[in-house]
Image: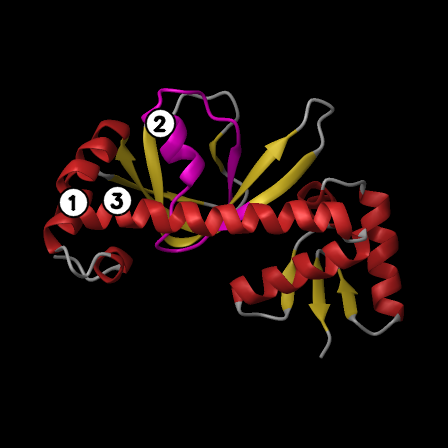
Amino acid sequence: MQDTILSSEFSSSPELVEKLYQYGITKNYHEGDIILDENASIRSIPIVMKGMMKVIRTEEDGREILLYYIKSGESCIMSFLGGMHNEKSVVKAEVEEDSEILFLPVDKVSLFIKEHPEWLDYIFRLYHKRFEELLDIINAIAFKKVDERLLDLLNKKAELTQSQTITTTHEQLANELGTARVVVSRLLKQLEEAGRVKLGRNKIILQP
């Protein structure tokens, strides 16, 4: 059995890990690559082996909003649900940093649920985590000002990357927050003047 994130995630079921490698296909992606677009057919489920993805929802007017991140060892619960019910994707999955992703055919997802309790537990844990994250987003949109949401997003990125230096653009942040670039630029300038961040070219440094 290969010593990878899957071996850790499913340590109680070496047989399941072997099947994931047997039926899955591993591919490498670069930052900014789209691995699943809205309205696309879901033929396989992505499991992030290395790196990180973000899941985005696009509105009819073209605005986007970040739903959640998918870290190493995790998968996209929206892909699970859509794939198992033969539905089109309602979200877009974009690579946040260079990643290695294992794609498991949808038919194997249902089969493993029947054969491996650890697989079903994995899906439930992902569902629970994403549900809580989506509740946090609803709460933030309803009760927090954009500047608070922006700072929360920056802190989240710093936590995920384990770095106080965040490589991103004002446009990307605006898309993830579902607001305009000019709003993000103005708020970042205010945060810089307050000593909360230091701005550079396509990077933001959080100040202690």
Location of residue 201 with respect to 29 vertically, above or below: below
Residue at the spot of label 1 = 116
Real-space CA distance between mark 2 and mark 3, rounded to the nearest whole angstrom: 15 Å
Residue 155 lies left or right of residue 114; in this view the side is right
Location of residue 3 with respect to 100 vertically, above or below: below
The mark lying in front, picked from 2 and 1, is 1
Using a 10 Å C-alpha cutoff, classify the residue at mark 2 as few (fewer than 14 neighbours), some (14 to 19) or many (20 or more): many
Farthest residue in the bottom direction? 208
Marks 3 and 1 in Cβ contact (< 8 Å): yes
Q: Earlier in the sequence, mark 2 or mark 3?
A: 2
Location of residue 114 with respect to 83 vertically, above or below: below
Q: Position of residue 47 (x, y in %)?
A: 34, 45
Residue at the spot of label 3 = 120
* Magenta stretch: includes residue 11: no
Residue at 19% over, 47% down? 117
Residue at the spot of label 2 = 83
**Which stretch appears magenta?**
68-95
Marks 2 and 3 in Cβ contact (< 8 Å): no
Please give the count of numbered marks on the rendered protein: 3
The amino acid type found where label 2 is placed reads Gly
Residue at 16% over, 45% down? 116
Real-space CA distance between mark 3 and mark 1, rounded to the nearest whole angstrom: 7 Å
Marks 2 and 1 in Cβ contact (< 8 Å): no
Query: Within the image, what quadrant is residue 65 found in?
Result: top right
Q: Position of residue 68 (x, y in %)?
A: 54, 47
- Residues 44 and 198: in front is 44
The amino acid type found where label 3 is placed reads Leu
Real-space CA distance between mark 2 and mark 1, rounded to the nearest whole angstrom: 19 Å
Q: Position of residue 121 (x, y in %)?
A: 28, 49
Q: Earlier in the sequence, mark 2 or mark 1?
A: 2
